[in-house]
Amino acid sequence: MSHILSKSTYLLGVQCKKALYLNKYHKDLKDEYTEDQKAIFAQGNKVGKLAQNLFPGGIDATPDTFYDYSKSLEQTKNAIGDGAPVIYEAAFQYNGVLCAVDILVRDGDRWNAYEVKSSTSVKETNIIDASLQYHVMKNCGIDINDISIVVIDNSYQRQGDIELEKLFKIQSVLSEVLQLQSSVKNNLLELKNVLSKREIPNELIGSKCSSPYDCSFKSNCWKDVPEYSIFNLAKIKKKQAEKLYHSGVTLITDLPYDYKLTSSQAYQVQADRDGSVIINKNNLRSFTDQLEYPLHFLDFETTNMAVPEFELQRSYQQIPFQYSVHIKNRKTSDAIHHEFLAESKCKDPRLDFIKSLIRDCGKSGSILVYNIGFERSILNQLIKSFPEYESQLQLIIDRMVDLMIPFKNKHYYTPEMQGSYSIKKVLPALCPDLSYQDLEIKEGGTASRIFGNMLKGDFNGDEINTRKQLLKYCQRDTWAMVKILDEIYFQIA
């Protein structure tokens, strides 16, 4: 018998009833999964498979296809009847509700259930998930001793072969699950009622469209929201923006004149209303006065992985694999470019990265970065893993200057920045002829995902051309910094 709700659609409905209804009856309105989302799903599957080795020798009841669980239900029933000690992807159905449990382990006459997540902590939505599983299993006659969430321990540092008992943390959520059983019953009644109706539920857009997950129907529901709207007001809380939008404030210029704003927000609102540009020459001069030549314009790219591939690597630790640096010996001299892109053949890139970076950054001159916290944290991690390079890497850290500061502090602001001080907004605002739109790889997340796949041997594209595109992207970041600083100098000349 087919099911009405599954574990995934139950979670969808708890987040938004409209999304549940659209998923059932209007799948054509669903957004296509992005490559980043696909990568997250693939990583989750990989982590789930690896976690099975915590309880080896199980019967695998994984369905042949995502939409046909009948065989899984039968396999699970037979495995329980045959006395199997462990079942993977054990499937159960009760009263039109289907769920599958990642790992089910026999404990005498009772069972321990484990749900595996690729995150590093147990989240509220994981407990809601487990609560539904408990409800279905209990009503199918499964005597549950405990139910737990298995997550990644990001303090684990690989030394030799992967140690699964250190890579994973197991946290019982039985007490929380038991407390939610009445709400599970109420939710199921409500969600089934939603799906029995002939009309789409009336749900307002807001913060729930991206919490706890980005909704796959957001493009449809947000189609009337301008690309630049009240939701783009700097530092505004999601609930606050939601309330303003539903009160009729669609654009930032729609805000009442007496609405309380921070100083940063006030700059943005004023600029949007009258097109004003803020250029604080004194503060900009104070920024440039600290710079020492030769100037180095530096940018890193990093990747991370749930399961550490290399020695002295932690789960989800950012691993630098690429940098670009433009060097100007004097203000009027041409920029000299150096770059590094690690080998993409399952080799730890960090030592080669360190040696090349130390050589290209030299021993003198300011090193301009954009958002210093990121580069500084990466170098500090490298120092911990490779302390023999501490003095050279610390010298690089000590010479760093954050080019983001003049824009973050609104020493230079134009309406085109739209309340943001990210380089992706600042560059086209200051240098309209220069952007990222002509590149095949346009942002760091894509670069991280692609090279991560290369490192793990999971990349199926044209590696030679893709490496060229990675270099072009990183080079654009540091060339953008060169042009941005030129514009600052022009304004204070």
Image (cartoon, rainbow, N blue to C red):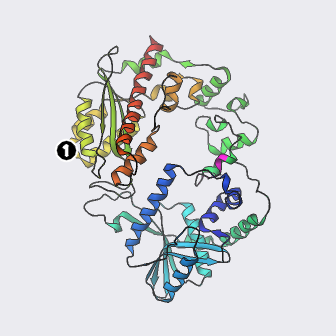
The quarter holding residue 69 reads bottom right
Label 1 packing within 10 angstroms: few (<14), some (14-19), many (20+): few
Residue in view at x 63 percent, y 64 percent:
9
Residue furthest to the right in view is 198
Say which element carries label 1: helix
Label the magenta part by its dominant secondary structure.
Answer: loop
Question: What residue is shown with label 1?
Answer: 388
How many numbered dots are placed on residues in this image?
1
Residue in view at x 51 percent, y 86 percent:
78
Compared across the picture, whether 230 is left or right of 474 comes to right
Position of residue 262 measured from the top left corner of the image (x, y, whole percent): 61, 32
Query: Magenta span covers which residues?
Result: 211-219
Residue furthest to the top in view is 493
On the question of residue 246 being in view, the answer is yes
The quarter holding residue 225 reads top right
Residue in view at x 23 percent, y 36 percent:
392
Above or below, 221 against 181 in this view is above
The quarter holding residue 286 reads top left
Please identify the quadrant where the N terminus is shown. bottom right
Compared across the picture, whether 353 is left or right of 443 comes to left
Please identify the quadrant where the C terminus is shown. top left
Query: In terms of depth relative to the viewer, which is nearer, 264 or 460?
Result: 460
Above or below, 78 against 268 in this view is below
Position of residue 285 measured from the top left corner of the image (x, y, whole percent): 43, 16
Position of residue 178 measured from the top left corner of the image (x, y, whole percent): 59, 74
Query: In terms of depth relative to the viewer, which is nearer, 188 or 33?
Result: 33
Compared across the picture, whether 232 is left or right of 145 comes to right
Position of residue 154 measured from the top left corner of the image (x, y, whole percent): 38, 57
Please state which amino acid type lies under the numbered disc 1.
Glu
Question: Would you say residue 8 sits in the magenta stretch?
Answer: no
Above or below, 471 against 461 in this view is above
Question: Would you say residue 216 sits in the magenta stretch?
Answer: yes
